[in-house]
Amino acid sequence: MKNIHFIPHTHWDREWYRSSDAFRIRLVYSLDKLIDTLVNDPNFSFYTLDGQTCIVEEYLEIRPQNREVIERLIKDKKLLIGPWYTQPDLYLAQGESILRNLVLGSNYADAIGGCMKVGWVPDAFGQPQSLPQIFKALGMEAMFVWRGFNYRELDDSVFLWQAPNGDVLRSVHFPLGYGHYRYLPEEIDKALEDTNNVIEQLEPRFHEDQLLFMGGSDHARIQPEVPKILEALNDKLSPNYQLTISNPEKFIAESTAAIEKSGRELTVYKGEARSADLGRIHAGISSTNIDFKNAMKHFETLLARVVEPMSVMTHALGGSFDQGLTNYFWKQVFRNQFHDTIYQSSPETVNHSAYHRLTKLRHGINELIWLNFRFLRDTIDFSSVNEQEDVIIAFNTLSQKREDSMMINLFVKNPVFSLFTLDGEEVPYSVVENKTAINNEIEYYNGLLNLNDVADEREGTQHQVQILVSAEQVPSLGFKAYKVVYGQKPSAKLASTDLYCTESNFGNSKLDVMINEDGSLNVTNKVNGQSYRDVLVFEDKGDEGDEYNYSPPADDQVFTTRGGLARVNVLENNPHRVSIEIAHSLALPLEVVDSKRSSQKVPVDIVSVVSLERGSSSLKVESTIDNTVNDHMMRVLLPHAEVSEHNLSEDHFTAIERTNRILNAKPLSEGATELELPIYPMQRFVTLANTQHTAAFVSAGPAEYEVYDNQTIALTLLRCVGMLGKADLTVRPGRASGYKLETPSSQLNGKSVSSKYALVFESGQPNVDVLSSHADRLNVDVQTRHLKCFTRQQNKAVSGTYQLNDMSNVELLAVKRPENSADYTIFRVVNRAEENKEISLPGQGHWFECSLKEEIGKPLENHVTIPAQSFITLAWKNV
């Protein structure tokens, strides 16, 4: 007899075509009905609540009196929740964010009765190659997935998925999707007809006697009649079948037992899942409303790589910080990384609500950063600082010593000053001629600006000055204090600088850069003699797609800045940095009408600031596009000097090699849900694979690329559309994804959209460790504050130079306080390379193995092995 596991469930989009508050009202009534049914009907055995705990948390904010009954249902395994906090997109969230989402989600589930022991990914638009590793690290026994797989590669819906690090996890593919049957008909003959039809489709996908029948869909409510309908169906079904209410854990247990009994070896699948055969993956979703996505990258990086390491340092010196403060803001990140939210595939007002959460993140993160400076203000020994001197504190939260410069913003009473360490060593600096704009909103005043500074500057009693200082002196995972000595002209100069600059040429000992009349760059890598021509050309294409998909007009026109005339201005030329402003005005069609770009053209201004620091092999770029047109996509181009059919981009814990063209894709004519385009998501870098030398984009925001002609990498900076969903797109025929609603703000018309990225030129084949180091320095600034209100006394005698731990031999994903407030520090270490790494651990303190859930394991000696293409979590106890 074949057992058909009928899994009642809901997929709860916390916001999508309605806001989270509107859906919360529906959620309250839905869960009220769910609880009532599960409590009062012993025959309704199980219900699966979409694998995300925010649903329960947000329900209990309205119905706190129902906590006890929910806990009882979860403990009794009638209600299954977790392990996610929210269901994120798996490509637009960083690896550490995904891990933290699962830790907080599963911890919440455990606290209210228990966490489901399987990973649950019903609706992410494609799934990364590291997913088995992630769920296995969390202790999951299996995972359920949908989009991205196809029948051509998998002839079984139960298989083994192997991650790059070798981890293997039993996986179940929803062969008909997670929502193939929303509600069973109460009319039994109709239910029987539909069930037989489903069985016919399921049987080829499950080779043992256990079949998976999904009963639910988006925002589906519990159907109390299910036990009676199943009972009636069992009387009418062929005696070869039995329908039972089930859950994901039960299906895994019984299907595993059946497979072991049969002795059949399961298919092993390797790699990511991005096929559009069975379900749309929406190429283009990674660049819709890119200003929002850029901001999300910035804030998740600040939380993991700045706020938490700073707070660990000050806690080690006696501060009172605990993890709960950052977890509050992590939850804001997770709400914005919920898949429909981070996609920005919603109506106007719902998209706007996610932007409001960005403001909450900015407020909170700025305050958390300032708390650490305030603690050091009251703790460091400032007895050597006199009344006419101020103090600067700089944090390096990276594990590596920095080779770049840090920008310090000051409001000084005398623009003539020198900079010294607290030990009296003078420190050379360069004044920034073209000051970086500082946000003057009140929440940003904390330490960097304050109301009096702004007022005093206007009255002429204070002067805003920005300076560049080499960050080499600031210890890795540490801080350093400096003093500002007024009235003394600086005498110290950099020991050496290799920078040079003319109106059309600049460079250093590693790179020589010629500026062409059209604003493109010819770059020569002086170390290996390799030259790259026409770098930094901007390209614009038409886009008649929607918030989900890029779709080119049938009659497209492509415009570039190549051959035009750019305005070039030298902004900075000092011993620390050369900065060049390159401005274009590109006349572009106003919109797309009837699948054709219009004849009316409007100028769009593109201003890029290109910076080169001494000794650097990268050109840092910030491009700002003042968008004035609709229905288009703009990219920046990096032509490589070599040719390759493959590209290499950063994945969550390693790198992934992809073909530049989609191979063996199912055509639309044979039923593919959309045309597969070689538009790929990335984490922080992309380059060509298998080349002798490296030319790469490193990004601090944009996360979408394509490779043209096996040579030119195109990084998407802007994609502007005016509909949530459209029907019958060129790349996606048939029904609209989402709803056919106008979303004019997604055109970003009238907005200035800025993106930060770097052009990296290295000798030798692409090295993921080197590119990751470039990405760290681009994404994580040295945090500096000019302090004027402090006591010039010994305070608690903390030294002005401090290092938490010397971890310079590894790349860190996280340095954090533990979730349980124990007296440990948690270090998450990643090895992106294809070989294991054995690393030495710093001698001070005690080191322990640690699980992702932060369960402390056995003590470690002075070394540990990090498996290839993997991460490990360590616990450190200071002594």
Image (cartoon, rainbow, N blue to C red):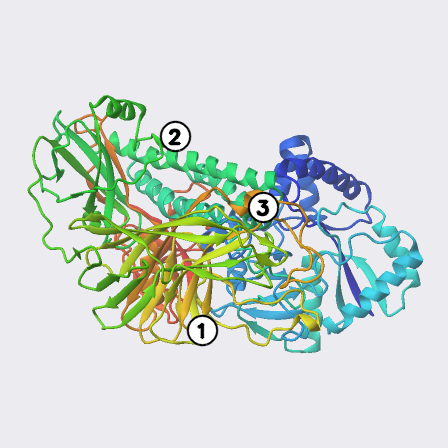
Nearer-the-camera pick, 805 or 676 = 676
Q: What residue is drawn where x is 26% and y is 34%?
A: 376
Q: What residue is drawn where x is 27% and y is 65%?
A: 523
Q: What residue is drawn where x is 67% and y is 51%?
A: 738
For the residue marked with disc 3, what is the amino acid?
A: Asp
For marks 3 and 1 on the same chain, the one whose residue lies earlier in the sequence: 3
Mark 3–mark 1 distance (CA, rounded to whole Å): 51 Å
Q: Position of residue 172 (x, y in %)?
A: 65, 65
Q: Is residue 415 left or right of residue 459?
A: left
Mark 2–mark 1 distance (CA, rounded to whole Å): 46 Å
- Residue beneath label 1, please? 709
For the residue marked with disc 1, what is the amino acid?
A: Asp
Let me know if residue 107 appears in the view.
Answer: no
Q: Position of residue 3 (x, y in %)?
A: 79, 65
Binning the other alpha carbons within 10 Å of mark 1 as few (below 14), some (14 to 19) or many (20 upward) gives: few
Q: What residue is drawn where x is 19% and y is 56%?
A: 614
- Residue beneath label 3, please? 110
Q: Are marks 3 and 2 in contact (CB under 8 Å)?
A: no
- Residue beneath label 2, please? 441
Mark 3–mark 2 distance (CA, rounded to whole Å): 40 Å
Q: Is residue 591 left or right of residue 569?
A: right
Q: Is residue 623 left or right of residue 56?
A: left
Q: Give SS at disc 2.
A: loop
